[in-house]
Image (cartoon, grey):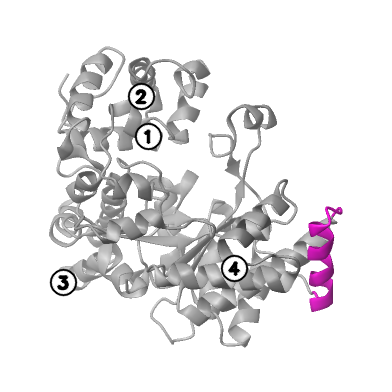
């Protein structure tokens, strides 16, 4: 059955929203400044085998929905054929109405494959064959998929031990889309994690430093920051429950790290002190190199111990946490600002109850030195849907300047996730268009249109300065 569900004015509820989107936002390039795409697949211009290979594998949003419907894990992460996995996804889609998956699914089918049918159990096999025939061709290689959505830059996320070989390889090509990376050293911070010492050994090898004490660790991380910087990195990223800030002495941190290297138990309080010390060291180093620092806060990860053992992390067993964010975050940012070593900073929030906390926190450290120096990042993970994005933008508007907002990112592992930028832009334009119609905003299309263009593209372009 054909559908006009995804039409030109999808989510745009009046003429003002339509004008803002079509004239000021739709054709802006995409700067996707944080994602988890594979640089290997980009550098090698990979061609996927079928639609399941690119669309369902690795997508724990879809996996959670399928499990909720009662679909056996064999058709999700198990050994079922790719076709059978897709058929089960097709069966699931009609049940995702009012979940953002329903919108994203049909946006992606329309934008990448010119398919305007509503995916369901009856047409899933036909759509599998049609999409797989397209995806398994050079026109749908990874680089061409990025070009298809007008991506200007994508920024992947790598661990300090990564050798960045695929970023280096890609720079020798004329791929048409810029690729950079973000430095993610969380494994060096989380001293309480199982396998921490093995990781530190690996870090020492790539940095050519035998890491015996805390100074060695700092030296190794600094060497890797220099290496990443030489390879075009201008961002870091941290995925933490919350920012820790505990008082500590240098001797305490040296002793804590020494104890860990000797495989002694680390108390919870000592772990918090170590987190505080190393994060301050890293943040000051980011400032030195002129990087942007990103903090994704508030996820409660790996809740299902049984399935974690079977499938590992990042497989769909995470949720929103209710961590205390304000006081320690303020102390952390203040400690950096007091030394004039606070880098450009983006704070992402996963708990909507904390939206106003972060929307006001950024104002404490926007000191006039840089436009929008400290940012309240867009709705992410469980909040990168219409309601979540609207609440984030309302909080930012009410307590800050949405005109300085650097807009959307995918935070995704999927090469088909880029219509989320379109989704965000439509939500933004509709939010403003409705307020023009109601008289809450003036019908100043030139100014409001400029603001839309800035949020869609220009602010990020200026902020990151790649």
The residue located at (68%, 65%) in the rendering is 210
Residue 408 visible in rendering: no
What is the distance, in whole Å, between disc 2 and disc 3 at their CAs? 40 Å
Task: Name the residue tied to disc 1.
Answer: 101
User: Which mark is first along the chain, 1 or 2?
Assistant: 2
Task: Name the residue tied to disc 3.
Answer: 446
User: Which mark is first along the chain, 4 or 1?
Assistant: 1
The quarter of the displayed image where residue 295 is located: bottom right
User: What range is drawn magenta here?
Assistant: 248-265
Residue 142 visible in rendering: yes
- Percent from the top left, x then y, of residue 258? 82, 64
The residue located at (79%, 58%) in the rendering is 261
Task: Name the residue tied to disc 2.
Answer: 93
User: Mark 1 or mark 4, which is nearer to you?
Assistant: 4
Q: Is residue 261 covered in magenta?
A: yes
**Discs 2, 3 touching: Cβ within 8 Å:** no
**Mark 4: secondary structure:** helix
**Discs 2, 1 touching: Cβ within 8 Å:** yes
User: Mark 3 or mark 4, which is nearer to you?
Assistant: 4
Residue 111 sits above or below residue 325 on the image: above
């Amino acid at each position: 059955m054909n559908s006009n569900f995804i039409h030109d004015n999808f989510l745009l509820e009046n003429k003002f929203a339509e004008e803002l989107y079509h004239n000021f936002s739709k054709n802006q390039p995409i700067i996707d400044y944080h994602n988890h795409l594979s640089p290997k697949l980009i550098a090698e211009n990979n061609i996927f085998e079928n639609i399941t290979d690119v669309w369902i594998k690795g997508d724990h949003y879809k996996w959670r929905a399928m499990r909720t419907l009662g679909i056996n894990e064999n058709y999700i992460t198990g050994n079922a054929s790719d076709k059978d996995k897709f058929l089960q996804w097709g069966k699931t889609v009609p049940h995702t109405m009012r979940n953002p998956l329903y919108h994203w699914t049909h946006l992606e089918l329309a934008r990448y494959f010119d398919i305007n049918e509503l995916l369901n159990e009856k047409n899933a096999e036909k759509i599998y064959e049609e999409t797989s025939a397209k995806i398994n061709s050079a026109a749908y290689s990874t680089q061409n998929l990025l070009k298809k959505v007008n991506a200007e830059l994508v920024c992947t996320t790598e661990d300090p031990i990564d050798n960045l070989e695929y970023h280096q390889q890609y720079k020798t090509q004329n791929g048409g889309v810029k690729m950079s990376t973000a430095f993610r050293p969380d494994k060096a911070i989380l001293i309480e994690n199982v396998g921490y010492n093995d990781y530190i050994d690996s870090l020492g090898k790539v940095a050519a430093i035998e890491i015996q004490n805390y100074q060695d660790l700092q030296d190794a991380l600094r060497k890797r920051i220099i290496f990443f910087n030489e390879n075009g990195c201008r961002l870091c990223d941290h995925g933490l429950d919350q920012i820790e800030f505990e008082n500590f002495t240098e001797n305490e941190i040296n002793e804590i790290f020494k104890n860990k290297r000797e495989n002694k138990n680390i108390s919870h309080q000592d772990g918090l002190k170590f987190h505080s010390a190393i994060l301050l060291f890293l943040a000051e180093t980011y400032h030195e190199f002129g990087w942007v620092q990103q903090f994704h806060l508030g996820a409660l990860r790996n809740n299902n111990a049984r399935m974690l053992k079977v499938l590992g992390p990042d497989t769909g067993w995470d949720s929103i946490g209710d961590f205390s964010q304000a006081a320690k975050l303020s102390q952390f940012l203040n400690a950096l600002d007091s030394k004039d070593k606070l880098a450009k900073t983006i704070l992402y929030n996963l708990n909507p109850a904390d939206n106003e906390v972060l929307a006001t926190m950024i104002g404490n450290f926007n000191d006039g030195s840089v436009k929008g120096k400290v940012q309240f990042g867009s709705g992410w993970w469980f909040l990168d849907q219409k309601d979540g994005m609207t609440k984030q933008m309302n909080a930012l508007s009410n307590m800050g300047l949405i005109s300085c907002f650097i807009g959307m990112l995918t935070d995704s592992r999927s090469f088909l996730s880029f219509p989320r930028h379109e989704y965000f832009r439509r939500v933004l334009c509709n939010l403003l268009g409705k307020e023009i119609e109601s008289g809450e905003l003036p019908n100043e299309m030139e100014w409001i249109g400029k603001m839309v263009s800035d949020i869609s593209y220009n602010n990020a372009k200026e902020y990151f300065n790649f």
